[in-house]
Amino acid sequence: MGITLRPPRGWLDGSGGLFALLALLTLLPASCVLWFMNDALTRESASAQQRVLEAYRGQLRLVRARLDPIWRGQAGRLSGAGDPERQFDRIVAGGIADGAVLLGPDGTVAFPDRRDGRSPAAAVLDQEIAAAAGLTPEARVEAVETIAARLNDYTAPLPAMARLQLMTRLRSLAANVQLPTQAALALSLEVLDAERPSPVPEVIRQTAAPDIWALTSTDGRAIAFYRTGRLESMMHDILHQVAPAGITFIASPPDVPGDGEAIAAGPWLPGWQLTFVPLDTSAMDAGTRQQRTRYLAVALAGVAVMAIVGIVVAGSLRRHLQVARLKTDLAAAASHELRTPLASMRVLVDGLLADDELDPVKTREYLAMLAVENARLSRLIDNFLTFSRIERHRHQFALAPARPAILVEAAVAAVRDRLPADCSLRVEVAPDLPEVMADAEAVTSALVNLLDNAIKYSHSPRQIVVRAEPNDGASVTFAVEDNGIGIPLREQRRIFRRFYRIDRRLSGETSGVGLGLSIVELVVRGHGGRVDVRSAPGAGSTFSFHLPCAAGGVLA
């Protein structure tokens, strides 16, 4: 099968160390350059980010300094002279605080207090609420709105407890009634139950009631109450007004741990912390990022150039090594194959010359063996010349109509004299085959090479079949089948390589230089076709190819 030579060794077998060294010399400097560049850029970026963070910290300290005047102004809004009930309504209904306690000149609670909630005005409203419960739905809505307006009117004196109780009863009658001060009254009374209010100026202190904070007015006559959520919302609004672009400030209550950048919120908010969060970290140092991109682009381009150069050099080196190995293998194989017939011919000639008188029978026998060795040597040289001409595209195929039977007969005749005694060669040519367009000499040579392979690699007794049969109505199939050693599937794509050889354990010690199948493939390819192989180890092989019919030729 043209596979008598050792296959070219893999390029990693003899030159793996060289290629590994080449890859190392290419990749190691590139990796070092990238690492040093990335480290320098990382340090530079970290330094730039640190500078930006320092600027943000300075702005955070500036914001904290601005909080004191803001809360001092908030305490000033709580101050005001007048009726305590009206002051309560102004603070709560105006959205200044969630609740409030108004103190008298002597520091006692003026409103709201825990005194008995019974009063004539409260009794009248209580009766009206009871009457509204018995009205029709339409009349009840109007009555509820009238009662709610009177309960929301703090110009009319009404004890705080009575007002809250009446509001609660009215809401049970109409859940959606507008009573904006009801929650504030409940919150204020809750704080009064938890502690005795005392004014503490210039600080927002935490009361005894959970989650409630107190702020004293500048005149000390009003104490406003804030839930923690309301205080956080107010701080968010305040900080949002003074925050520069690209950053947001956050205020955290005492029970929320701050991050590494958190600072105390100042004397007005003991226990509270302020911190900042950049809105766009990528914008912290746009110049450094652009510089990093440029440096990395240049570095990657350099690495790519080095890699391309390395690949080109490696490919060129690989090809040169392959050519050198092929030359070495060819020289070794050719010298072996040429030496064998020459040595046989020399022994035969020396045998004849050693006789004083020539024996006609012995002489004819020796001359016949000399003719066989000479034919073998001629075939070997012809294969070299044919392969060289075809591979260098110096051989022009002379395509002409040819009869398939004649091509098969010529190939069989060429090998018949060297058929072993245990070989059975059967020819099967379909009748009435049309002529094919082929170079008769080249196709005959291809068939001879296939027959030689079948003879060399078949089991004893050898059974070889050569066929010519119609294919698809426009071509003729030529096939050579044997009962030989077979070819593994993984090797079937490689056997047409020049000088390629499968495992010696499969092929045995056979002669040849590994050009037979290469010549077959080149000839068939020159006729516009390809060689097909069907084989399995131990089950023989079948090589086939197709030739187009001559113009006007139609298969019967």
Image (spheres, helix red, strand yellow):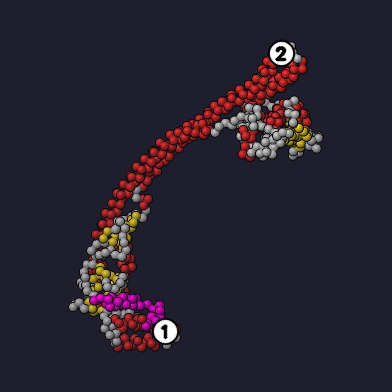
The secondary element bearing badge 2 is classed as loop
Verify whether residue 192 appears in magenta: yes
Kindly identify the residue that appears in the image at 62 percent across and 37 percent down: 491
Most foreground residue, 144 or 40: 40
**Badge number at residue 35:** none
Kindly identify the residue that appears in the image at 42 percent across and 41 percent down: 297
* Amino acid tagged 1: Arg
* Residue 165 picture location, percent across and down: 33, 82
Q: In the image, which residues are magenta?
A: 169-196
Q: Is residue 143 visible?
A: yes
The residue singled out by tag 2 in the image is: 355
Q: CA distance from mark 1 to mark 2?
A: 150 Å
Most foreground residue, 172 or 474: 474
Q: Classify the position of the N terminus by image quarter.
A: top right
The secondary element bearing badge 1 is classed as helix
**Badge number at residue 140:** 1
Q: Using a 10 Å C-alpha cutoff, classify the residue at mark 1 as few (fewer than 14 neighbours), some (14 to 19) or many (20 or more).
A: some
* Residue 386 picture location, percent across and down: 66, 25
- How many callouts does the rendering have? 2
* Amino acid tagged 2: Asp
Q: Earlier in the sequence, mark 1 or mark 2?
A: 1
Most foreground residue, 194 or 465: 465
Left or right placement of residue 97 versus residue 482 in this view = left
Q: Is residue 404 visible?
A: no
Task: Name the dominant secondary structure of the magenta segment.
Answer: helix
Determine whether 319 is above or below 43 in the image: above
Kindly identify the residue that appears in the image at 74 percent across and 39 percent down: 472
Q: Classify the position of the C terminus by image quarter.
A: top right
> Would you say the residues marked 1 and 2 are in contact, meaning their CB atoms lie under 8 Å apart?
no
